[in-house]
Amino acid sequence: MMKTIFTFPGQGTQHAGMLQSIPHREAIFTEVRAVLGDETDQLDSPDALRHTRAVQLCLLIAGVAWARELIEHEVKPDILSGLSIGAYPAAVIAGALDFRDSLRLVALRGDLMEQAYPHGYGLTAIVGLRLNQVEKLIAGSNTYIANLNAETQIVIAGRDEDMAAVAQKALETGASKATRLAVSVPSHCTLLDEPAAKLAEAFKYVTLSRPQRAYLSGSTGRVLWDPLKIADDLAFNMARTVQWQDTIVSANQRDARLAIEMPPGSVLTGLTHLAGWQGEAICRERSNIGMARHLLKHLTC
């Protein structure tokens, strides 16, 4: 039977004002204020979005809001998956993690990451080279493989000047692009082992449930049903390499034929096509509910 997957983007897709047009904004904000208080109204301001905490909270809130709206209109996911912070709204919509708990955990996650690396670090995407080529370039550079987004789209993590040196070498080697991403921490590598361990401690005080829909890990490309394994996946994904290409291949193998990316952006939709997707892939930001329903009906006929 044909399945639908909702995907949720990671950092780098955020923009000022991104929460102003979310569905049922006042109802969602009431839930958020109960946890975050007055901070809620400034989360998507340009000043707030300079901080990892606000960026991650905005992506969580937006993902949950847009996914709930689709479900309300009978476009229901069978599989949920998110890249990095996107795993949190995925876990909420899957039914594994309570939304209010997710707000507390994501606020802490952002704080821990930013406190560990307040400035001078981040991520750089290299397009046009394969993994073995990038591995040779980063040898001895103090940078790390962070994301395997597609066969020839690989993200590295590290200090700004070290990444810039690798980026220059990548372009000289034949990369089509080497772009510093709008991420201010060196995610998805061993540099974040310590903050991840601290976040894992906080998960001990939160009860997760067996999900009602399949939770597909963006770190392993595997579906997880055990609440303890989902908690481990969420806590440590900041320090684990993103295996996004494997994740999409896994969804394909599970008969997912409609992929809908939650706002903001369309990055994951592009990556879905690059992974040899055998169905339809759209982003909610550019496609209305009518389009989603039409594709769902067409694919199930």
Image (tube, grey):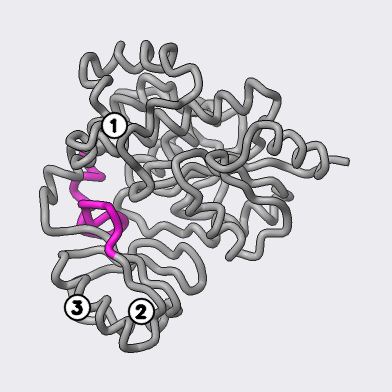
Going by the image, does 41 lie left or right of 4? left
Query: Which badge, 1 or 3, is on the more N-terminal residue?
Result: 1
Q: Quadrant of residue 203?
A: top left
Q: Is 86 above or below relative to 95? A: below
Q: Secondary structure at mark 3?
A: helix
Q: Is residue 193 magenta?
A: yes
Bounds of the magenta segment = 180-200
Q: Residue at x 30, y 53 (%)?
A: 239
Q: Position of residue 179 (x, y in %)?
A: 31, 67
- Residue drawn at x 63%, y 25% as measured from the top left: 71
The amino acid at mark 2 is: Val
Question: Is residue 22 toward the left or the right of residue 134 in the image?
Answer: right
The residue that label 3 is drawn on is 165
In the rendered structure, the answer to whether residue 16 lies left or right of residue 27 reads left
Verify CB contact (< 8 Å) between mark 1 and mark 3.
Answer: no
Dot 2 crowding, Cα within 10 Å, few <14, some 14–19, many 20+:
many
Q: Circle 1 is placed at which residue position?
A: 44
CA neighbours of label 3 inside 10 A, class few (<14), some (14 to 19), many (20+): few
Q: Label 1: how many residues lie within 10 Å, few (<14), some (14-19) or many (20+)?
A: many
Closer to viewer: mark 2 or mark 1: 1
Residue sitting at 72 percent across and 59 percent down? Answer: 278
Camera-side residue of 70 and 234: 70
Residue 221, x across and y down, in percent: 53, 54
Q: Earlier in the sequence, mark 2 or mark 3?
A: 2
Q: Nearer the viewer, mark 1 or mark 3?
A: 1
